[in-house]
Image: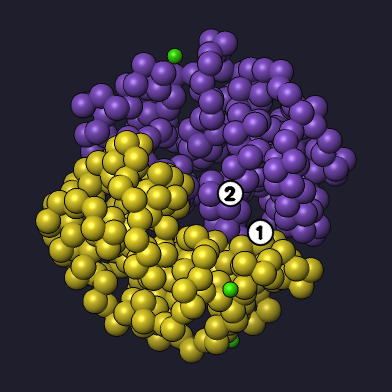
Chain colours: A yellow, B purple
Amino acid sequence: MKLFIDSNHLSPYAMSAFVALREKAIPFESALVDLQRGEHLAAGYAGVSSTLRVPTLSHDGFNLSESSAICEYLEEAFPATPIYPANVQDRARAREIQAWLRSDLMPIRSERTTEVVFLRTPVPPLSDEARAAAERLFKAADGWLRQHGSTLFGTWCIADTDLALMLNRLVLAGDPVPEHLARYATEQWQRASVQEWVNTTRPAARTTG
Amino acid sequence: MKLFIDSNHLSPYAMSAFVALREKAIPFESALVDLQRGEHLAAGYAGVSSTLRVPTLSHDGFNLSESSAICEYLEEAFPATPIYPANVQDRARAREIQAWLRSDLMPIRSERTTEVVFLRTPVPPLSDEARAAAERLFKAADGWLRQHGSTLFGTWCIADTDLALMLNRLVLAGDPVPEHLARYATEQWQRASVQEWVNTTRPAARTTG
Ligand SMILES: [Ca+2]
Ligand SMILES: [Ca+2]
Ligand SMILES: [Ca+2]
Ligand SMILES: [Ca+2]
């Protein structure tokens, strides 16, 4: 089992796949891809990832990109320790959250890159557009967390890590975040699998995530 | 069962959820949301969709947004007519493709909106960035379609409809598309469930998708 990840460990999606593997205690090796040097565009990588992206999982000759697809594949191939909820509606909600975090909230993702999260790079105040996106994020997260508070569904699932990452783009930048959401994100961040990714030694690189 | 869709029927993601319901022969009613008038931002819609987006499925009081999550939910709740492949690796690939089409290829999606596809709006030539994205799309699609040609996995799945939509942004704009990929997209477009969406009466609206 091999996981291709960005060499700076800044991709939030590489983190999600990494956490999935660690939570399932699946042994794997990491293969570092230097996005700044364009290694994902080199001829060899197209043989690994049709979409030329990280993360990509390589398992017994089967190569798979897109972190949400990787998480789902790991869940099906290694079901012993689940990373998605067992309940059909909860599992659907986890998928909704994963899909939304990967396809919306662009102003937050561009003004609060993961350099803020993992390198603690200082940033200027949020634009009006990013503050509006943050309000949407807070309202959605508030609704999703109303029942359990410290997790989405009562026990941890991979969507908790993804949601905490998005919230921590703001928390760790010092932006105003409702206290209960900041607490959720900070508590989720303490998880051992997440802390292992957070504490990876990384160069002070100029890459966005 | 109710599906909230954009009132202009231009959202490619609403189309994907619509096709999923039709393929499974699940009776449902459509609820039209006028995005231009901001109906998705009105107070009532937040009670339906936490992310304020279309499509949203409402099933026995359970509301779910994000088209890929809706397709997966329908597959679990109504498994009789599958819309995903049965094989674990093929299903993983279908998810990879769905996730990629929803999170990448932005220059194609912005320069070839679904107005081109559904309203046949004339458009200027592609930018360099969009042509580069098109090349990435062609290479990926070529690899995925190499085995079967007319479908991704030998029998239709929902990712075929999503991939054909992306290719048809270019085909229907008159952009150069490799012949075998254009043929795949054109053939996929003839599917009855897709044609029903395509032939919906829609105003010549100024909305993007
Ligand atoms: Ca580097
Ligand atoms: Ca193995
Ligand atoms: Ca309208
Ligand atoms: Ca019902």
At 70% from the left and 40% from the top, the residue drawn is: B130
Tell me how far mark 2 sits from mark 1, CA to CA: 9 Å
At 55% from the left and 83% from the top, the residue drawn is: A30
At 80% from the left and 27% from the top, the residue drawn is: B174
Furthest-top residue in this view: B203
Kind of residue sitting beneath label 2: Asp
**Seen in the image, is A100 located left or right of residue B142?**
left
Residue A79, by quadrant, is: bottom left
* Residue B129 x %, y %: 70, 43
Q: Nearer the viewer, residue B145 or A207?
A: A207
Q: Nearer the viewer, residue A85 or B76?
A: A85
**Residue receiving disc 1:** A51
* Residue B142 x %, y %: 79, 53
Q: Are marks 2 and 1 in contact (CB under 8 Å)?
A: yes
Q: Compared to A195, does A76 lie above or below?
A: above
Kind of residue sitting beneath label 1: Thr
* Residue A131 x %, y %: 29, 41
**Residue receiving disc 2:** B104
Q: Residues within 10 Å of mark 1 (few under 14, many from 20)?
A: many
At 34% from the left and 51% from the top, the residue drawn is: A124
Decide if residue A140 is in sight here: no
Decide if residue A176 is in sight here: yes
**Seen in the image, is A182 located left or right of residue A137?**
left
* Residue B76 x %, y %: 41, 53
Kindly state the secondary structure of the residue where label 2 is placed. Answer: loop
**Seen in the image, is A138 located left or right of residue B181?**
left
